[in-house]
Image (cartoon, coloured by chain):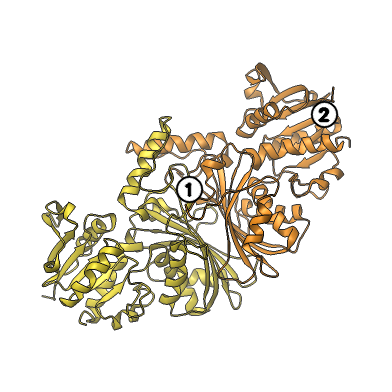
Chain colours: A yellow, B orange
Amino acid sequence: MSKSYRVAILGATGAVGTELLELLESRNFPIADLKLLASQRSAGKTLKFKGENLLIEAVSDRSFENVDIVLASAGGGTSKRWAGVAVEKGAVVIDNSSAFRMNQEVPLVVPEVNPQAAASHKGIIANPNCTTILMTLAVWPLHQVKAVKRIVAATYQSASGAGAKAMEEVKTQTSAILQGQSPVAEVLPYPLAFNLFPHNSPMTDVGYCEEELKMVNETRKIFGSQEIRITATCVRVPVLRAHSEAINLEFETPFDPDEARAILSHSPGVKLVEDWQANYFPMPIEASGRDEVLVGRIRQDISHPCGLELWLCGDQIRKGAALNAVQIAELLIEKNWLSH
Amino acid sequence: MSKSYRVAILGATGAVGTELLELLESRNFPIADLKLLASQRSAGKTLKFKGENLLIEAVSDRSFENVDIVLASAGGGTSKRWAGVAVEKGAVVIDNSSAFRMNQEVPLVVPEVNPQAAASHKGIIANPNCTTILMTLAVWPLHQVKAVKRIVAATYQSASGAGAKAMEEVKTQTSAILQGQSPVAEVLPYPLAFNLFPHNSPMTDVGYCEEELKMVNETRKIFGSQEIRITATCVRVPVLRAHSEAINLEFETPFDPDEARAILSHSPGVKLVEDWQANYFPMPIEASGRDEVLVGRIRQDISHPCGLELWLCGDQIRKGAALNAVQIAELLIEKNWLSH
């Protein structure tokens, strides 16, 4: 019998936490013991795993004893508070928050893109931002053939990026509007139903919100290249759980769209979705619940001889968060990289 | 008493037609006689104008006798069929369809941008595509100061662009989904509720849909510059009636965002909407029903020294169609350019 591992989910009750639970079960992750950790508020509740009701524990210093892998998705503050404790007790922490992503000692990993970066971890591996993960899956295989010089991205981000409560809020707002009432915004800053707005992450002093700078800085770190120039406009749209991105790429020399298509048709984690006759391309409702990032509308940019346009949709909770984290855990096991 | 004019609306019952009627009334357009023209199907119905019920007539050869101005918004086929007839009877046709826009003999006019182009009409003046109108309003004032070299645009287009029926369809689909039913798509090719997809206009052989090429070609014609390089990704989103656009501009030399802000804060047809502290920028629900295009998030593009990013929202039916057409009519009257 192959080895199995003691896993803890920190932030088990959130949108990403429940998806982690589902993925550990459906992917038959080799689990010896599974601990569900959350705030005091959720302690005592249960969540189903392989037909059993698992009790949620309030996280404490003792939670990380006898744990091999911690999958953390409870926000930056919680990760900063507990990651060090878990590492000290011998666990590897795969962290979904932005707390450690730009820390030079912490690898930032998309398993299909830079798996080798995970080898040098010192106990913490960071899971990139959802929009970044989705974009790197489509751009990295092209970047391997011809270096990308510049990326101009515009995103269409679903409510799930702001958590399960935001998803519920959009439904409630939508229902209110359809009944002739005014929508109420409590989780998100403005009504998202039948509306959209620039991403509500904190604004930085260069005029980019944090979400946009994540796409810039995390992509550079994952690609191991500070030369790539990236700009992004991140926008929240009234979609429930998959993000979409319009991506304009500029290379040193022209990139034949047919070659790009051929490359992306067999790239890991990518599914090419293009029916030009039927005007059928990736859509968030079809990306929802899927592992692959759907990529299509690959075309020569008519404004630039070395430009290429593409369009993608990916499940924000799945590949954009939970699945990527589980894949990192699987990679560590496969490569025997758990120790630190 | 100042002069008044005999006006006909061709396609009076559509989303743009009813908006035209509202604008002629609210702007107190100098009307001597108003004729509502539509297909045989709508003939005999009535529409309200200044408290009176006006009878809708089926369009025929005789409809354009004794008419000074025709505001046409019944689609390209109808415009091709009737514009020549109307012009022959002495009317000026302001056409909302794409039928004549790229015809070299037909001026393509945004009154705030290229009013002088209207002077040379030969009976027909074309109203540009909605996304183009909105973009030119924000970009033209900057282009006057420093020539734009390249534009990379991504759009977030509302259901109204596909007409009143598409707006109804999105509401019906949304309601179905909230009740746990499957959405039905009949007007648009795919469900738009809680979803989005690349614009459903016909695909061309360069991989751009017609909507995208309109942004490219019409902007060049309106700006009177074939040098500007433009690329666009057009996307339909589940918003009811205002379009949004993420616009990346490249100039020959750097463009100070503060200078751009100062310019756009007093540009005609533009309202600057920017509260950086509150992360408050243009939103389609706030652009709906307004005359101005809301522009904001003006920032230095960190990926290019001569790049500038901006974000805009504009009412697709109003400034994107009906209002622009009425403004063209007002321009012709003001300048005494009605004769041909």
Q: At which x and y percent is residue A238?
A: 43, 47
Above or below residue B188? Residue A333 is: below
Q: Are marks 2 and 1 on the same chain?
A: no
**Do residues under tags 2 and 1 come within 8 Å of each other at their CB atoms?**
no
* Left-right relation of B133 to A323: right
Point out which mark residue B68 bears: 2
- Whether residue B133 is visible, yes or no, is yes
Q: Which chain carries label 2?
A: B
Q: At which x and y percent is residue B177?
A: 36, 39
- Whether residue A326 is visible, yes or no, is no
Q: Seen from this angle, which residue lies furthest top?
A: B52
Circle 1 sits on which residue?
A196
Inspect the image, locate mark 2, and give the three-letter code of the amino acid beneath it.
Answer: Asp
Q: In which quarter of the image is the C terminus of chain B?
A: top right
Give the distance between the C-alpha atoms of the residues marked 2 and 1, in whole angstroms. 41 Å
Q: Residue at x 41, y 75 (%)?
A: A222
**Element at badge 2?**
loop
**Element at badge 1?**
loop
* Left-right relation of B231 to B92: left
